[in-house]
Image (cartoon, helix red, strand yellow):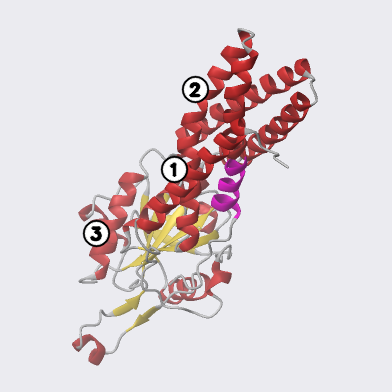
Amino acid sequence: MNRFPAGYRLGLSIVGLMFLLAALICFGSGGPSAAGNRVSIPGSVALLGRQIAPFSFVRETSQPVGSETLKETVWLAAFTFTRCPASCPRISSTLKGLQDQLAGSSVKIISISVDPRHDTPEVLKTYGAKFGADPDRWWFLTGPESEVYELIQKSFLVSAVPTTPDMQKQGAEEIAHSDRIALVDKDLKLVRYYDSNSPDELRQLVTEARLRNQKSWVKALPKWNATLNATSFLFLMTGWFLIRNGRMRAHAFIMLTCLAISGAFLSSYLTYHFYVGTVRFPGTGLIRQLYLSILLSHTVLAVVLVPLIALSILRAIRKDFVRHKAIAKVTFPIWVYISVTGVVIYLMLYQMDHSPGSIL
């Protein structure tokens, strides 16, 4: 039995060919992206959402800074010391770049000294000025050595260990420490670590920090957008059922309502990305290539869909129902694909677990 007349088959063929072309582009552009060389630690996935323990230190201005000060703030944490000859200047230069990219936001950068005996507030202030640190947004913390090390090792679960003279003769720095940058959400919850050597991960860090720093209504927009897409799909199927049963007036009402829902989605989508910018997919490997294939085909077909909808409506208004029916059979499968993949993209980007097996 032929369930799909020629018009529907044309629309379905356009969808299928576009997805195939997008998949060829995305899968052919390269293999799984590298996540960087990481040192695995037991239970590293459990770090995500880990609560940072209370602390009380002092910053480069000699002002006290503690966990209560940062409780309502999104912040980046890095571990450095001023006498560090190699890795710390690189990390601090990276933080300066992040400071520039996060301009206009309230995200703070916190450099915690792993050499608190030497790194007094005065020393840290000079060091911060050397790297162009904005004192309103980039703070340098020091405190009692035992408390600093306890916070780093027990809350952040990263290393901060003095090296032996023999190790230093072989090129080791005076204090071995992690070069990862931690993202900490409001309420002092650890989000994840980012490789300070990876441009891709640093871009993800900026996006994630900006997203978590947004107001609650902005952060709720992706879920709202997915709901609008799902609702659009339900109205499309209802409209299709109605016209198949000859209920033209009800069909027209449902399809115009569906058009209004799609318009609301577009407005909400543009508002969200105005505030947040581009949101990059954090996953790697084949799942990333699949996501990009869906996203590329979704985006291209969304552009194609606009004139198709306009032409369908114009022919209906002119009561040219024969030609309206012909173009609608092409428009319908594409519109359904856009609605369904809009939900899929949301689930893959915001709900899928992208926790790395090892993050340090």
Tell me the CA gap for discs 2 and 1. 41 Å
Q: Quadrant of residue 246?
A: top right
User: Which image quarter is the C terminus in?
Assistant: bottom left
User: Mark on residue 307?
Assistant: 2
Secondary structure of the residue carrying numbered label 1: loop
Of discs 1 and 3, which sits in the foreground?
1
Whether residue 33 is visible, yes or no, is: yes
The picture places residue 223, in percent across and down from the top left corner, at: 63, 41
Q: Which residue is mark 3?
A: 127
* Of callouts 2 and 3, the N-terminal one: 3
Residue 343 among magenta residues: yes
Which residue type carries mark 1? Ser
Compared to 257, does 289 lie above or below?
Answer: below
Q: Which residues are magenta?
A: 340-351
Q: Which residue is mark 1?
A: 106
Compared to 94, does 240 lie above or below?
Answer: above
Q: Residues within 10 Å of mark 2 (few under 14, many from 20)?
A: few
Of discs 2 and 1, which sits in the foreground?
2
- Prevailing SS of the magenta stretch: helix
Which residue type carries mark 3? Tyr
Residue 22 among magenta residues: no
143 left or right, relative to 42: left
The picture places residue 336, in percent across and down from the top left corner, at: 62, 36
| Residue ID at (59%, 57%) | 352
- In front: 317, or 284? 317
